[in-house]
Image (tube, rainbow, N blue to C red):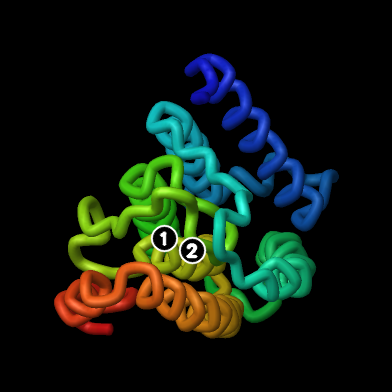
Amino acid sequence: MPQPLMNRLVHATTIWIVIPLILWTGWGWDDGKGFVAEPARAGLLLVWLGLCWYGALANTRTSNSSGKNEIRKHRQIFWVVLPALIAWFVYLPYADRHHIATTGSTGLRWLGVALFAVGYWLRIESIRAQGPQFSCAVAIQPQHRLATHGPYRWMRHPAYTGVIGTIAGLSLVFGNPVAAAVMTAFVWIWMETRIRDEEKLLLHEFGLEFSRYARQTRKLIPFVY
């Protein structure tokens, strides 16, 4: 049963409040003003808040249900990947403040904000298109239907494209093209392992319907890949 809107907004805002706290931990608590002195970093926080609220309005909280048919190894992989993601998230502001492999390019930083916003929005729209059957697990849910509307009209795994976009965007917001390249490649490879197993499940569940859909779409980038 969906939560009331106010509860969803409070939940989203609470999560967002944690985000600057983690970033400032990497940046350093002695210079909070320095963090927001860069317009792109301040813009990131505002965009992130807006998208958190947008996700709450769209009622896009994800499920962790294992469904009726799950490939459970991906839960274990997630717990291996998570520490690397946390370390990267703290490292970005630290490296930015101490000028480690960073660039002062204002244009690159705002490009990062744009990539982050598009990636986050794409993930929200992907979850909304799937509805209650969207799960963080690699699984088929009871009464699962093949989603072919919303962003799924153009790509089979838009939620993963969104994750890749937010990772690349965040790295660029903090002026770190090296981190952007390394972490984007790392996360892309991780997403590919999930896609491989998800498509096996979808082919087994939907057969010809999925085969036809797969021929008409791309995996991650419309018309390209």
Residue at position x 50%, y 47% from top? 44
C-beta proximity under 8 Å, tags 2 and 1 = yes
Q: Tell me residue 124's x, y (percent).
A: 40, 46
Residue at position x 65%, y 36% from top? 15
Q: Amino acid at mark 2?
A: Val
Mark 1 nearby-residue class (10 Å; few <14, some 14–19, many ≥20): many
Quadrant occupied by the C terminus: bottom left
Q: Which residue is mark 2?
A: 163
Instruction: Return the residue nearer the eye: 22 or 205.
Output: 205
- Residue that lies at the very extreme toward the right in this rendered image: 30
Residue at position x 71%, y 51% from top? 23
Mark 2 nearby-residue class (10 Å; few <14, some 14–19, many ≥20): many
Instruction: Return the residue nearer the eye: 108 or 124.
Output: 124
Q: Is residue 185 left or right of residue 124?
A: right
Q: Which residue is mark 1?
A: 159
Q: Tell me residue 164's x, y (percent).
A: 47, 69
CA gap between label 2 and label 1 equals: 6 Å
Q: Amino acid at mark 1?
A: Ala
Q: Is residue 217 left or right of residue 118?
A: left
Q: Is residue 200 left or right of residue 185?
A: left
Check disc 2 and report its element: helix, strand or loop.
Answer: helix
Where residue 145 is drawn, which disc sits there? none
Q: Splitting the image into 4 quarters, where does residue 155 fall?
A: bottom left
Looking at the image, residue 52 lies above or below residue 151? above
Q: Is residue 95 visible?
A: no
Residue at position x 26%, y 60% from top? 152
Q: Tell me residue 114's x, y (percent).
A: 36, 56
Q: Splitting the image into 4 quarters, where does residue 16 fall?
A: top right
Check disc 1 and report its element: helix, strand or loop.
Answer: helix
